[in-house]
Amino acid sequence: MQKSSLIFPLALGALLLGFAPSLLAQGEGAVHGLVIAKADGSPLSNVKVSLEGPTLIEPIQTETGEDGHFGFQHLAPGSYSLVAEREDFLEERVRFTIKPRDVQNITLGLSLRPLTEKIEVTAELVSVLSIHSPSSTTLEEQRIAAIPLPLRNNIPDMIVTTAPGMVRSHDDFVHVRGSEIALNTFINGVSFWENPHSMFSPGLSPDLIQSVNVMTGGFPAEYGNHFGGVLDVVTKSGFSMDNRGALTLGAGSVLHHNAGVEYGGHTQKVAYYLFTSGFESARFLSPPDPRSIHNTGRGMRNFLQLDFNINSENYLKLVFLGDGTNFEIPKTPQDDELRPNANASQRNRSQSAIFTWSHVISKDTLLDTSFYQRWSHSLLLPAVDPLAATARSERALHTTGIKSDLVRFFGRHTIKGGMDAVLLKPDEELFYDHTGYMRLTRLLHLSHVHIRTIDFARQKTGGQLSLYLQDKMQLTDQLTLDAGLRYDRYSLAVSDFHFSPRLNLAYRFSPAGAVLHASYNHFFVPPAVENVLASSAGLTGLIPRIGAALPPLRPVIENQFELGVTQPFRGRLQLGLTGYYRSSNKPLHTILLPDSRIYAYANFDRGKAYGLEIRMELPTVARLGVSGYLNYALARVYLYNPVTAGLVSEPDLVTATGKFLAPMDQTHTVNAGFTYRPARSRVWSSMTFEYGGGTPVGAHAHGGESMGQAMGAATPTRVPPHFTQNLSIGMDLLRNGDRPRLGLQFNIENLTDNVYKVAQESVFSPGQFSIPRLFSGSVKLHF
């Protein structure tokens, strides 16, 4: 590392330490504010400020100090209203939304009460300006609970039908805006590096989420690592459970069985929340045939959160997670006939712990520091058949880190600074011998690529240091600018450092009118951690037609531009329109070794993605009991040959030139849904809809637009479009006041039984297929 690269991190670290006596970091959420007189802008003391919201059992109150400041800490995500009252002044109200780990800085101006007492003036309810992208989607606990239970086994299944621009791909991957590595999950502010998709890790259960903000653009400098959809999760707490719990049992076709129990409670100082669940399915992964053969999977997830409200200045949180899945690798009917013993399987395990300390220094300030640890392990057991490749992969990752976020308020400025230091210890073993598969290709007269036997074992210690500083400036009542700079120093596959500037702007045309959003985000994306050592070990040299080893994986450098507008209608319906352009230098893509589920990674030369996203959301209309949403994405994604680093199994990838449509390119993507829940009825219903225009049939080795064009077709070859629907009907049989005691839910997934091809890697390989029409039901007992 060059000396010049140390100047900024050392200076930034010193600056943060200088702020330490008067800094505040973010927990779940916080509100800082200033109350002034509108006439002359002077601060007002002794103003009663009340905070109201559905997440609060009753309004909480405070008073402004001599400097006019007030603050509320440890707020759960949700919608809130602030009310400021003082004698001789008119009441002032504002409404705002706290997203996960959000901090709001609000200025309230009070007007003198008119001298004529008979004139009654009602303050207009004004919304606080947000810099979040119009494509940002927040999912609360109630909306998550309405999703069919089988679709809540993991995060990707839940997100793909609820947020804009989510594209399904092979092995149940979900891609966002052209990113191969998608869905970067933050758990209470901590980001782990494992991919949440089922092939790579046990994942995270949506049932323990209190709120999640799905972000695809407009990233402040505090966010790092991967940007194919950031999921900022706040987990449930015993402080909101009120000594209650629930038991859920579910059953369905193709062994779609689930069971889960949760319980949470609290005293004045201590809260606890426990969640445990198990699930199984005979269609665990998307199979390579409409029939699901050798495709049973089972999993279990455990979660414990302890909260300690030690005093008004100190708050502790401990989070523990233990998860595991065992599943079979699906195969085709032809495999079942010709290779009856080609039965590969995989086991994923993980254990995580997060310890967070929040220290309140004043109404304005709080320090939030987290220590975190994770151990994860994945074992792919090979097929044992004379006509199958022998593919065994075992990898483990030990993660240890410390993260601290800090914020300082200066009038209309909210200055945040933070650091994240993580130590990564991957340990990888890989054995691959495709002799048996070569016998099969000769038997079926198929083409193949000869690969020498791979016998690889290595472990290494590395990590990343990240620092950021950002300022959210409320320049006027209509204009807010968030400007920041991030520094990342990565050392694992290679050693590199980078600076990432971020600019996010929001301008509101009227107090309740349209909001213009614009952003420029620069990203530093480290290589994926799965098989990072094997992908960087020069194993490409084992392919005779290539002969030479490729360099180790490189970090991806990206630039993303966004321009959008948000328009509310009649205070209810929200319409968001976003255009984006993302360019990538050395984008990563998965590489699959033939006849196996061993995934490696390679860097292509460059890539680009651009498109248009529309998001409509209708919050619950109490009079009608209706809520709904609609997301539409128009997109184009290109990758550019050749492969420049990593591991490949196709020689043409190293010599090809030109651009091609990326495997996650889907021109039109739509997901929508509505819920009907009348206030006085015990019955509710919901439906979700999904449309995809089809992704390209792969084969980027030939250059050109896609394999279809490389073989002479006028247009790229794509899998057929699909349109599916899911229906859920629920009933609350017993109630205790406003709370249900016993609930039933019945689900039909893929209502019209449209078994479509999700993706196909090439014309020489089978595609992967969606679920058929499935029936399931669940019962939930609250206690």
Image: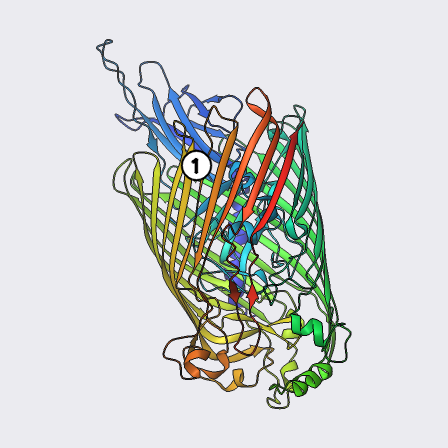
The colour scheme used here is rainbow
Reply above or below: 316 against 489.
above
Residue located at (47% from left, 83% from top): 702
Asked if one can make out residue 581 in the rendered structure from this viewpoint, the answer is no
Residue that carries the numbered disc 1 in the rendered image? 97
Reply above or below: 694 against 154.
below
Residue 124, percent across and down? 29, 26
- Judge from the rendering whether residue 338 lies leftward or rightward of residue 114; answer left or right: right
On-image quarter of the C terminus: top right
On-image quarter of the N terminus: bottom right
Residue 673, percent across and down? 44, 44
How many labels sit on residues?
1
Residue 6 in which image quadrant: bottom right
- Judge from the rendering whether residue 51 lies leftward or rightward of residue 534; answer left or right: left
Q: Amino acid at mark 1?
A: Thr
Residue located at (27% from left, 27% from top): 40
Residue 471, percent across and down? 42, 47
Crowd tier of the residue under label 1, counting other residues whose Cα lies within 10 Å: few below 14, some 14–19, many 20 or above? some
- Residues 220 and 509: in front is 509
Q: Secondary structure at mark 1?
A: strand
Residue 369, percent across and down? 61, 44
Asked if one can make out residue 18 in the rendered structure from this viewpoint, the answer is yes
Reply above or below: 246 against 119.
below
- Residues 630 and 357: in front is 630
